[in-house]
Image (cartoon, grey):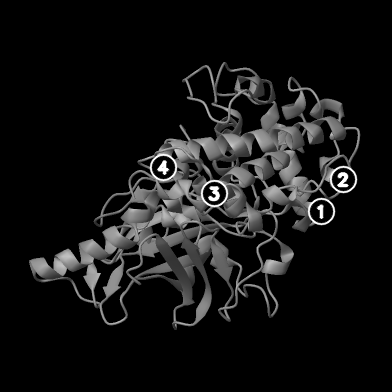
């Protein structure tokens, strides 16, 4: 994919290896010395450094896709590299069944033997649903399907192999090359080439912008004390690095977010954007640092704090009340958000206008609850001028961003060319 905006914001540039011979190392690339890194087999043409569920650095060897006409699916073989010593790993299959249903996406993760490990289904008008290896839907927690709780991992009711989440993440989906095989063989006619091209267009290109939203995060309370300490330390260290707007300390640059509008245009060197997209851009700068510095944090993303829970000790810094949060109101729970903020409830004439109107309603409803938590937690979290200096601010605004992301996945993310809501 060429224009996955969010993926290109959060992740390193892919090293394309179309032919044996040269290659450019990625930042902190631990697999640079592997034989296939410089002389890849003919059907293995993409390598990038990936970050897994457990926060361990992993390399991914994504092999060229194959369209299976008998099963009507596009499938990629992905090798997750575990061993630096012999450059070996485990092979998985990422499958996109072609059900020929409009506004419908399905992604399966399978073992190399073809056993289902988990899948994701998404339809316009509802939140995506995750399924475990038994093809049983995982319950969507109130922060949505992309915030991983302990109940979603392991056991009879969870996803058995946690690498499954990583393989369905935008970090992988944003790096899938066009397929080169049809039923396991290179196409030999123009008709066969067209079949392969159409499969890629229908299953990948058509939904490339949607896939940027498939970004998994961990629930802060689900991390152990060591993981929380690592996350808090990484955030705190970045707060005192120079920010991207005026070169002030990163936490001081928070005031460059326009808190008076749901979204707003970004201006290079002056503004991050509005309330929703400005905070998303602000967090993206932090997460770029996680990647560049090889921070050992799950998915290299800020975890999400459930504000109905006590702020963990590791994040109890420069605040007054660790229990100052409050539960998500029913209107903002993932299970209700599509129905409560459906563009069909708007009387506006066009889809763009309807979506914009419902986004404004979401923003206005969230604003009071958001402001109340800042004040109740208190300390530096209270004033807008100091709130970003606290480490809990960032997991808190990850949660706020998740609310917006959930709403976008209901409809807005399916219309990237008709509604410029993100203005990233």
Q: Earlier in the sequence, mark 1 or mark 4?
A: 1
Of the two numbered discs 2 and 1 in the rendering, the one whose residue sits closer to the viewer: 2
Disc 4: CA contacts within 10 A as few (<14), some (14-19) or many (>=20): some
Most extreme residue toward the front, as rendered?
347
Q: Earlier in the sequence, mark 4 or mark 2?
A: 2
Q: Is residue 12 visible in this depiction of the protein? A: yes
Find disc 2 in the rendering and name its residue: 313
Residue 330 is situated, as x and y percent measured from the top left of the image, at 73, 51
How many numbered discs, if any?
4
Find disc 4 in the rendering and name its residue: 351
Disc 4, SS? helix
Q: Is residue 313 left or right of residue 205?
A: right
CA gap, disc 4 and disc 3: 11 Å
Q: Quadrant of residue 38?
A: bottom left
Of the two numbered discs 3 and 2 in the rendering, the one whose residue sits closer to the viewer: 3
CA gap, disc 3 and disc 1: 39 Å
CA gap, disc 4 and disc 2: 45 Å
CA gap, disc 2 and disc 1: 9 Å
Find disc 1 in the rendering and name its residue: 225
Q: Is residue 411 left or right of residue 154?
A: left
């Amino acid at each position: 994919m060429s224009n996955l905006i969010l993926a290109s914001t959060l992740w390193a540039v892919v090293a394309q290896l179309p032919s044996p011979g040269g290659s450019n190392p990625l930042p902190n690339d631990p697999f640079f010395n592997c034989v296939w890194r410089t002389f890849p087999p003919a059907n293995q043409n993409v390598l990038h450094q990936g970050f897994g569920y457990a926060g361990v650095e992993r390399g991914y060897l994504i092999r060229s896709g194959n369209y299976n006409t008998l099963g009507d699916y596009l499938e990629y073989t992905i090798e997750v590299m575990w061993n630096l010593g012999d450059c070996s790993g485990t092979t998985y299959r990422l499958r996109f069944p072609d059900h020929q249903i409009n506004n419908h996406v399905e992604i399966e993760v399978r073992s190399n033997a073809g056993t289902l490990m988990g899948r994701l289904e998404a339809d316009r008008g509802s939140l995506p649903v995750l399924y475990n290896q038994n093809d049983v839907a995982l319950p969507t927690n109130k922060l949505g399907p992309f915030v991983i709780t302990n109940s979603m991992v392991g056991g009879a009711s969870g996803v058995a192999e946690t690498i499954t989440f990583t393989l369905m993440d935008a970090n992988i989906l944003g790096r899938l090359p066009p397929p080169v095989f049809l039923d396991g063989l290179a196409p030999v006619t123009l008709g066969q080439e067209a079949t392969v091209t159409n499969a890629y267009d229908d299953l990948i290109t058509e939904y490339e912008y949607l896939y940027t939203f498939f970004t998994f995060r961990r629930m802060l309370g689900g991390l152990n004390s060591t993981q929380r300490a690592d996350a808090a330390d990484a955030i705190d260290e970045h707060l005192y690095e120079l920010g991207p707007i005026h070169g002030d300390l990163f936490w001081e640059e928070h005031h460059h977010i326009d808190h008076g509008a749901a979204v707003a245009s970004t201006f290079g060197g002056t503004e991050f954007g509005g309330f929703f997209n400005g905070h998303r851009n602000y967090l993206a700068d932090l997460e770029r640092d996680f990647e560049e510095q090889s921070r050992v944090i799950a998915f290299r993303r800020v975890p999400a704090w459930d504000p109905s829970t006590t702020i963990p000790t590791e994040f109890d810094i420069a605040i007054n009340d660790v229990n100052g949060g409050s539960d998500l109101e029913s209107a903002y729970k993932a299970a209700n958000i599509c129905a409560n903020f459906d563009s069909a409830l708007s009387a506006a004439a066009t889809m763009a206008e309807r979506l914009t109107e419902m986004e404004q309603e979401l923003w206005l409803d969230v604003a009071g609850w958001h402001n109340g938590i800042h004040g109740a937690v208190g300390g530096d979290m209270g004033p807008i001028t100091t709130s970003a200096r606290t480490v809990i601010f960032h997991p808190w605004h990850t949660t706020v961003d998740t609310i917006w992301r959930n709403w976008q996945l209901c409809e807005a993310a399916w219309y990237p060319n008709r509604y410029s809501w993100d203005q990233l």
